[in-house]
Image: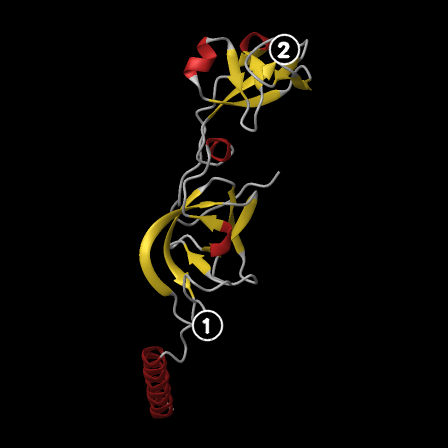
Amino acid sequence: MGGWRRGLIGVGAAVSLFVFGWALLSVASGENSLPSSPSEPSLEAAFPAWLNADSAFVRLRPSPESPAIGILRRGDRVLVTACHPDCESSEAWAILGLDGAIRLSLLQREAPSEADFAVSASAHYLYARVGAKGAEVYERPDFSAKTIAAEPGGSVLAFRQDEALQAQGWLSRPAGGFVPLKSVRLETPSSFSGEFRPDAPLAFFVR
């Protein structure tokens, strides 16, 4: 009985070694590797680019069927490290290092305008709560200027950081328009923040 078991164990070990060796050979020959794309991307000198669309998804791989792993807003800056299949194709994808891929046609190499940058994720804002009487939004930082909108009391609004303008008693909205500083109360930002590329494992709490 003991010899039968030892023989079975010996056969099993031999089969395991054969399977393991076959797996190594397959990986070495590329048979079991999953290509990130149908063909290798064209390597170009890395260059910065900015999103030239209202918003766009960043995909895990250079394919419209690939899962979305992020979103960019107009004026957001990225670093293009390669193109797929190349940077000249009308269907080219921009490879963003290890951060995914996006259609190259949605990007521009020129820095965005001040207005576009103001609504990008790179911009930093002040936040303020509108007073009980509401707040009027003016076309220019001047009470004689045309009123272009009215914000109800209690609303929390974002404003561009502009110390010189704030010293004059005005705040500037990201998409345009000016609100009198006296019509709002500046909020104190929370110290809470996320962690960029946190170490795994992760857990999410669901209420």
Q: Assign a secondary structure to mark 2.
A: loop
* The C terminus sits in image quarter: top right
Q: Say few, some or many: other residues with alpha carbon within 10 Å of mark 2 (under 14 / 14 to 19 / 20 or more).
A: some
Q: Position of residue 196 (x, y in %)?
A: 40, 41
Q: Position of residue 119 (x, y in %)?
A: 52, 33
Q: Position of residue 125 (x, y in %)?
A: 48, 25
Q: Position of residue 15 (x, y in %)?
A: 37, 87
Residue 3: quarter of image: bottom left
> Residue at left 41%, top 52%?
99
Q: Is residue 181 left or right of residue 78?
A: right
Taking depth in this image into account, of 177 and 9 the one nearest to the observer is 177
Taking depth in this image into account, of 104 and 158 the one nearest to the observer is 104
Residue 146: quarter of image: top right
Reply above or below: 194 against 103. Answer: above
> Residue at left 43%, top 25%?
191
Callout 1 amino acid: Pro
Residue hosting label 2: 131
The colour scheme used here is secondary structure
> Residue at left 35%, top 89%?
2
Residue hosting label 1: 38
Q: Say few, some or many: other residues with alpha carbon within 10 Å of mark 1 (under 14 / 14 to 19 / 20 or more).
A: few
Label located before the other in sequence (2 or 1): 1
Callout 2 amino acid: Gly
Taking depth in this image into account, of 13 and 206 the one nearest to the observer is 206
Reply above or below: 150 against 144. Answer: below
Q: Is residue 28 left or right of residue 99?
A: left
Q: Is residue 205 something one can see in this rendering?
A: yes
